[in-house]
Image: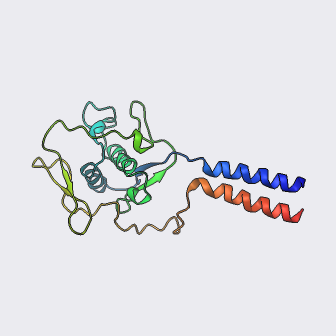
Amino acid sequence: MARFLVLVLVLVLILAMAAHSSATWCICKEGLSDQALQKTLDYACGAGADCNPTHQNGPCFNPNTVRAHCNYAVNSYFQKKGQTPTACDFSGTAYTVTSDPSSSGCSYPASASGATRPVSTTTNTPSTSLPSGGSPVVTTPSTGILGGSSNGLGPSGMNTDMSDAGILLPKNILLPSIILVFSVLVYWWA
């Protein structure tokens, strides 16, 4: 009976750990050219990300680098899409992390509720439409600042990066699963 109670207690603890969700952010990959990062930034900003904080005088303008602005934009898009794994791909130029990329004065949202809605002060903003194929197409305003036509960076693009070996388990379920298997083995051996 005592073994059964210990096993139940271990299972309850494991389930409690598995149910705890950790925050997830999306950032641009290291080692990419500024040109590749700019295309990703343009796509994210044109497809619904709130890029206003990265504009001049915004809380996330500094550091004023393509990488920093790309990180904020892809994370905003990822959060607005409900942290769907495919919303942080951008044809292999972005990936998810569990450590907060926020910096002093610039807070990255960790959920859709933390993502602010874009505030437009001009009528010259990009628009997104869904053609018959279903893929978003970003149209560029006449200033050419944002967007780009058919740049292929949509989150539904194919990711050929196999560094995860095709395993797409949530990061917070692997350790509890190992503990569960170990606990069951110890229970049967004892």
Q: Disc count in the image?
A: 0
Residue furthest front as drawn:
1
Identify which residue is drawn at 85% across, 65% down.
Answer: 188
Identify which residue is drawn at 29% across, 38% down.
Answer: 54
Looking at the image, residue 148 sits to the left or right of residue 77; the answer is left
The relative height of residue 114 versus residue 43 in the rendered view (above or below) is: above
Identify which residue is drawn at 67% across, 52% down.
Answer: 15
Looking at the picture, tell me which residue is in the foreground, 170 or 107.
Answer: 170
Residue furthest left as drawn:
142
Residue 40: image location, x then y, percent? 30, 54
Residue 82: image location, x then y, percent? 41, 51
Looking at the image, residue 34 sits to the left or right of residue 26; the answer is left
**Quadrant that contains the N terminus:** bottom right
The colour scheme is rainbow
Residue 101: image location, x then y, percent? 45, 42
Which of the 4 quarters of the picture holds residue 124? Answer: top left
**Quadrant that contains the C terminus:** bottom right
Which of the 4 quarters of the picture holds residue 189? Answer: bottom right
Residue 56: image location, x then y, percent? 24, 34
Looking at the image, residue 190 sits to the left or right of residue 26; the answer is right
Identify which residue is drawn at 40% across, 47% down.
Answer: 79
